[in-house]
Image (cartoon, rainbow, N blue to C red):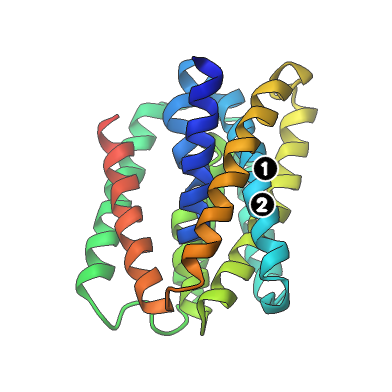
Amino acid sequence: MTWLLIILFGFLAGLVQGLTGFGAAIMMMIFLPSILPIAESAGVASLIMAASVLTLVLRYRHDIHFKRIIVPFLVYASVAAWSVHLVRVLDVHLLRMLLGGLLILLAIYFSLNKNAGTKPYPWLVAGIFMIISGFFNGLFGIGGPLMALYFLSLAHSTGEYIANIQTFFLIDIVYITTLRVFNGILTTTVIPYILVGMVGAILGTAIAARLLAHLNLGLVKRYIYAFIGLSGFYYLFF
């Protein structure tokens, strides 16, 4: 039953990642902490997500703009490298609630304000998004929602948005996984969980890619805002 659930949540993770550009780790973290410690769960979720992310990067490779990715990644990665050590000493439940509340407020704001996110953010706002995302990525392996808003504000098409955010996540997966391995958080014992989850993630991503081809950026934005709100409710109440 455990393996079937891993495939199921991997499938849902790939589906969500393919449609919104983020969220695979969120879906996996609903289930993985019930069978693994939270630090290991975050690492396994990130690696399961790698299958989905790599699939999307290859599909949208012609729309990648590396100049939009480098500086945000350096800020995000620097904070994640620091916060990855804090999962054992901070009040994780309180932090999850704070993140949940923030995401709900953002989802409401962007859903109601039609002009929000239609142009690039000031560097101060973008920097805050990067710092918060990196912090929570190091703790839970979940740094997607705010980075989705950042890359969405720069995109002129669905393909451009998906290409840049997935390339960002692919670089991040390599980086943060290396940190977790060197810190002894991830070992070879979790490889079976990763491989089984990847099967579901690839299937989910393949279906999402077919659906995404028929969606314009405006509709994708609505899905993104809705999923950010749902993510917030999950962090706040579970």
* Amino acid type assigned to the residue bearing label 2 in the image: Ala
Q: Residue 6, how many percent across, how many down?
A: 53, 26
User: Residue 223, position in %: x, y?
Assistant: 35, 63
The x and y percentages for residue 230 are 29, 48
Label tally = 2
Up the image or down, 50 lies above or below 84; here it is below
Q: Residue at x 61, y 24 (%)?
A: 40
- Residue 132 showing in the rendered view: no
Closer to us: 11 or 152 = 11
Give left or right: position of 234 versus 204. left
Mark 1 Cα within 10 Å, few/some/many (few <14, many 20+)? some
Q: Residue at x 50, y 43 (%)?
A: 13
Q: Name the image quarter holding the C terminus.
A: top left
- Mark 1 to mark 2: distance in Å? 6 Å
Q: Are marks 1 and 2 in contact (CB under 8 Å)?
A: yes
Callout 1 amino acid: Ala
Write the residue at 54% across / 36% down: 10
The image's mark for residue 81 is 1
Disc assigned to residue 77 = 2
Q: Which mark is residue 154?
A: none
Q: Is residue 201 visible?
A: yes
- Residue sitting at x 69%, y 74%: 64
Most extreme residue toward the left is 112
Task: Classify mark 2: helix, strand or loop.
Answer: helix
Image coordinates for residue 234, horizontal then vertical, percent: 31, 38
Judging from the image, what secondary structure is the residue with disc 1 in?
A: helix
Report whether 108 appears left or right of 167: left
